[in-house]
Amino acid sequence: MAKHDHDHEHTAPPSDPALRVKALESLLLEKGLIDAAALDEIIDTYENKIGPRNGAAVVARAWVDADYKKRLLDDATAAIAELGFSGVQGEDMVVVENLPGLHNMVVCTLCSCYPWPTLGLPPVWYKAAPYRSRAVSDPRSVLDEFGVTLADDVEIRVWDSNAELRYLVLPERPDGTDGMSEDQLAAMVTRDSMIGTGLVQAP
Amino acid sequence: MNGVHDLGGMHGMGPINPEENEPVFHDEWERRVFAVTIATFGGGNYNVDQFRHGIERMGAANYLSTSYYEHWLHMVETLMIENGSISRDELSAKQAQLAQEAA
């Protein structure tokens, strides 16, 4: 899994897009159509401030607070906003709950729709052709590549996101975590478990 | 629109290769493309449907052989030229100038 042999997906070759974006950025700055300070702030926000820790906080809250979980499954956008997470690419959220015998998985076959306020920016594989093509036709083989094996009788539901609607998986709380605090629970929740390509494992 | 971007169910796209501890961006140019895109989108230069259509109009072979942020770059160049914010000649001239300075 650590192997990094998909260079064509993000740097092919770097010099060309590097020059093109530099030219585009310079021209737009010269014309006053974008602002340099705003660019820095955008990068800082998405590189350092927004990420899967937000979604993990939502999951942990749902695990410890049954009323919150009900609100989350009824109106995810509002319940997620209660914890302070909202905005671009999270305007209309649906949370789907994993249960014994039911596993949910999220994809965007058309492009890269993903719940930014709760998960941050999507990983390369989520935006690339292999996952997008196969998640809907052969999810078990996809899960296999993530090291997840589900029993044959577990139903898998695959949710195809779009520009108007984005999904977050509420993973199952692992056994043996009864005494854990909300923060400890949140620390176990991985990004992939909220996409549905992973399961939460007790430490 | 039944274009190459409509990938659901397509065969032969290969392994997924998830990367462990993947960074948010893999290269400085990706960071710049992201910021310029969000800034021009946030500035009301185009809406989300134009954004997606700008990518979906890419040629099929080009779409499959380029990376995600190259799709975004193609889209911003295309839409900002089409809406008259910049001209293709201006952009080409700036690229030539920067290439010369870097040489």
Image (spheres, coloured by chain):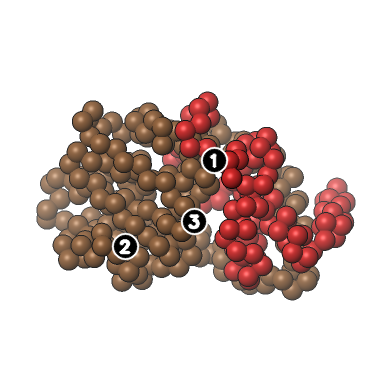
Q: Is residue A115 left or right of residue B73?
A: left
Q: Residue at x 73, y 61 (%)?
A: B80
Report the mark closest to the observer, 1 or 2: 1
Disc sitting over residue A76 in the figure: 2
Residue A163 is tagged as 3
Q: Which mark is residue B6?
A: 1
Do pointers 2 and 3 mark residues of a single chain?
yes
* Real-space Cα separation, disc 2 to disc 3, in angstroms: 16 Å
Query: How would you rate the neighbour count of disc 3 (Cα within 10 Å): few for under 14, some for 14-19, many for 20 or more?
Result: some
Asked which secondary structure carries label 3, the reply is loop
Contact, mark 1 vs mark 2 (Cβ under 8 Å): no
- Is residue A72 in view? yes
Q: Position of residue B46 (x, y in %)?
A: 64, 64
Name the side, left or right, on which A39 lies relative to A61: right
The quarter of the picture where residue A140 lies is top left
Does residue B52 sit above or below A8 in this rendering? below
Q: Chain of mark 2?
A: A
> In the displayed structure, would residue B87 be above or below residue A18?
below
- Between A203 and B88, the one lying in front of the other is B88
Residues indicated by labels 1 and 2 sit on the same polypeptide chain: no
